[in-house]
Image (cartoon, rainbow, N blue to C red):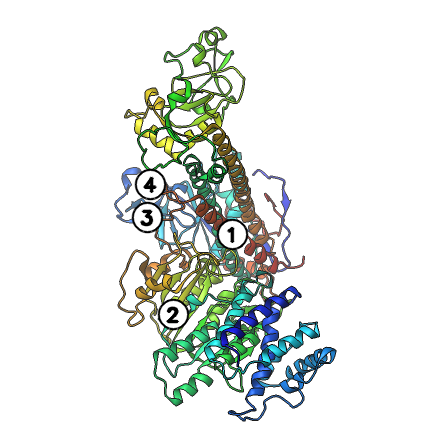
Amino acid sequence: MTDESTIVQRLWNYCNVLRDDGVSYGDYVEQLTYLLFLKMADEQTKPPFDKASIIPQGMDWQSLLSKDGAELEIHYRKILESLGKEPGMLGVIFRKSQNRIQDPAKLRRLVELINGETWMGLDVDIKGAIYEGLLEKNAEDVKGGAGQYFTPRSLIKAMVKVIKPKPGETIDDPAVGTGGFILASHDYLEKNYNLDKEQKKFLKLQTFKGKDIVDGVARLCAMNLYLHGIGGEESPIDVGDSLISDPGYRSDIVLTNPPFGKKSSVTIINGDGKADRETLTYNRQDFWATTSNKQLNFLQHVRTLLKINGRAAIVVPDNVLFEGGAGETVRRKLLQECDVHTLLRLPTGVFYAQGVKANVLFFDRKPASQNPWTEKLWIYDLRTNQHFTLKTNPLKFEDLQDFIKCYNPENRHQREESERFKAFSYDELIKRDKASLDIFWLKDESLEDSENLPEPDVLAAEIVESLETALEQFKSIYEGLGKERTES
Amino acid sequence: MNKIEEKLLILPESWTWGTIYNIASLISGQHILKENYNLDALGIPYLTGPDDFGLKCPTISKWTEIPKAMAVQNDVLITVKGAGVGKVNVLDITRAAISRQLMAIRSENVNSIYLYYYFKFIFSYLQKLGAGSTVPGIDRESILALPVPIAPIHEQRRIVAKIDELFSRLDAGVEALQKAMAQLKRYRQAVLKAAIEGRLTEEWRKAHSEVEPAKTPLEQVEGLELPHSWKFVTLKSICIDITDGDHQAPPQSLVGIPFLVISNIRKGELDFSKTRFVPEEYYESIPTKRKPSKGDILYSLVGSYGIPIIVNTKREFCFQRHIGLIRPSDVVDTDYLFYFLKSNFAFRQATDAATGTAQLTVPLQGLRNFKVPFPPLAEQKTIVSEIERIFSHSESIESTCEINLSQADRMRQSILKRAFEGKLVPQDNSDEPASVLLERIKAGRIKDSPRRGRKSNNVHQMRLIQ
């Protein structure tokens, strides 16, 4: 049996070989997904598992192994196509799959590489780490644009830590991407609790749900989870548009980072609103406001997904905090009907999307009541005078330690203000113009007329950020104008 | 009433034209004598004019216990007299008394924010209305006759929400641009600091290590650490002369040689557009060391002190005593010296040397003793070219920002125009047409006394300013 680290290395190296052949990281990860899955399914039919094969005969790993040259490539394509039509986990993994490795010799080489290892025997962590590593590399590949599916792991870890999942609770991510929140929650539960057999089973099969609108991403997610020991024959991952309708089920916890960007082919309307005759519309009676703003819609959707007294942490861009119109309606309703208790203002240079200014909003869903549920919103400013970059100075878990300490997950009703952590009362918030939650109090050193002049390159980076913010806002206005334009 | 020929506004079918008279009541403000209002929050808030206006809603600074004309919550307040004619606000408190400068427009059947945005849209038209008449200001008749494009009631709300949404993004974009411009100023200062500390030419020094090393430096000047091949020198040691303008006020003439004062150099360049003049004979009599020549540097010494200007012209001129003249010797690059004088480090020295209470004055002696970080001449030239390369980029970004800021202004107006042409949000067939709404309003007004002015209920197209 080959050394674990060697196989990792080989997979990485082969990745680069194929890259030169025009197979991007994204393509590579996909093909790896298919082949690995077939191999692992094959291993499960042998000792010590001796299970019945979940793969239809003639479409399995053995059938691939026996072939070569053009025949191999043809058969591989056949497998992909037919498995894509199967239900359950198989379908999620193989749906709409395509072969991207045109050269049969290279395909053969990859098959041999994977065949040379027993994957079921490999530590779950290793498998998971390899896969995650490839996903991360994929995210860095800016051309592919895959970065939008990848939330920095340090941020996820911090969010899970303060949300504090407990065994037996259900956790949902309606914009699951590659499954980062699910994995981190799984990890948290395994490490912090001594789970009995029942709890372990619940953790593996019933705790998690995730949905993503993009086939390819859902596939990666399902595989990612599978390699980490989450999910069985049925995949916990669903493919589809979360915003279309209320799925009906409710969860204890929602952790999610909805995609940035405005492109939406659909305008969601609420009960009062009227249909736009030209676009497809979906009725969400449970929504407070009609808007085409995807992030505002996700916020409303997340609230629907929660059980009463359920808790959520959602990454939202600045727009959600200050935008007028529907944004104001949603904020006022949210403050009233839910306990919106914490807001983390994230620094720039944390996400793969350029110029994005984002935050994490924490709130609990509450039962109906006359009185507003939000008493105080605690805001942590991790943005002012903080500079991170994706490569040279990435956001680490340590950078979030102070936030976690201030959040005080043991008892969030016993918090103390500090330089970066301040509380704002409900009355203060609703008095603000448009009930905007876009609040800062720290002095921005890049603007201060102090003796402490930052280095030119730091200031240059700040200028770029300001320009990118301006650009993003103006772009969103053009999009907002264009969409609503009627033919005259 | 003055009619200004402009573009026509064509409305969608479900909309209709109305006038203020049709859709609202108009309350004229009334003046309250000074002894009858207070600043102590006694009584009812009293708004005197647009100075009390905020971004959208007024701020209260006066109160009265004897209110006369009253506005109530949701009234659109419009300035009808004085400098701010045409400015509008919406009243967000229960009630307030209003002065003669203001009028309150109270519409029950047309969304007041919708109306508020409409007034913002026709602001320049209102301004012109106010300027045109013999008695400056807009009278009741003109307000009542103002045509208003009326959308179906639900659509009005949708329009308001959409404008709110777009304007909030616009505001955020503008704020970001203004922030970028402020940061650019700081950036330029940071670059100058790096320049005179030798950090822009680190690579250059490595490549030119044959340049002679330091002579003994002056005492370490606070905060500045120089590379070994540099030294601190006094300004006087690297200049031929440092003087200022004639201490006697020179004779003035209508023509002759331009005489520059601080306002002609405040922008950082020589501004000959509006100068005083002195007679030729006087100019001839000025000693050479006080006559500016190309390659000299002017430096303001009084009031807005610390502004350096390079004399880059052969044109003859002289200047007042509040301005200093620095004539660099050929051991120093003029542009390097200029950039040094622009830096915070130089400005701090000017501030430290400045005396006086009414107007701060930098004495010549202080200027002559400025400590200048002094690199070898070749390095000075390299530093200058680096600074200029970087500055040209930052200048182009700054002018882009300025262009975008004015575009943002036009975008605001364009959004409003779209809104009131019915093109901002889609129409909805199931909305009740606005003409029906208008009929209902008219039917509801049974007992109104006849008003002076236009009562026309006909739909008509208004010529509006874009």
**Upstream in sequence: badge 4 or badge 3:** 4
Q: In what element is the residue under mark 1?
A: helix
Residue highlighted by disc 1? A468
Query: How far from the left and from the top, in percent, is residue B144?
Result: 51, 47
| Mark 2 vs mark 3: in front | 2
**What is the distance, in whole Å, between disc 4 and disc 1 at their CAs?**
50 Å
**Residue B45 numbered mark, or none:** 3
Discs 1, 2: same chain: yes
> Around disc 3, counting alpha carbons within 10 Å, would you say few (fewer than 14), some (14 to 19), or many (20 or more)?
many
Which of B114 and A282 lies nearest the eye of the viewer?
A282
**What is the distance, in whole Å, between disc 4 and disc 2 at their CAs?**
50 Å
Residue located at (48% from left, 26% from top): B333
| Mark 1 vs mark 2: in front | 1
Query: How far from the left and from the top, in percent, is residue B277?
Result: 48, 14
Q: In what element is the residue under mark 2?
A: strand
Residue highlighted by disc 2? A363
Residue highlighted by disc 4? B32
| Mark 4 vs mark 3: in front | 3
Left/right placement of residue A324 relative to residue B5 reads left
Which of B50 and A364 lies nearest the eye of the viewer?
A364
Query: How far from the left and from the top, in percent, is residue A321?
Result: 43, 60
Image quadrant where residue A75 sits: bottom right
> Around disc 1, counting alpha carbons within 10 Å, would you say few (fewer than 14), some (14 to 19), or many (20 or more)?
many
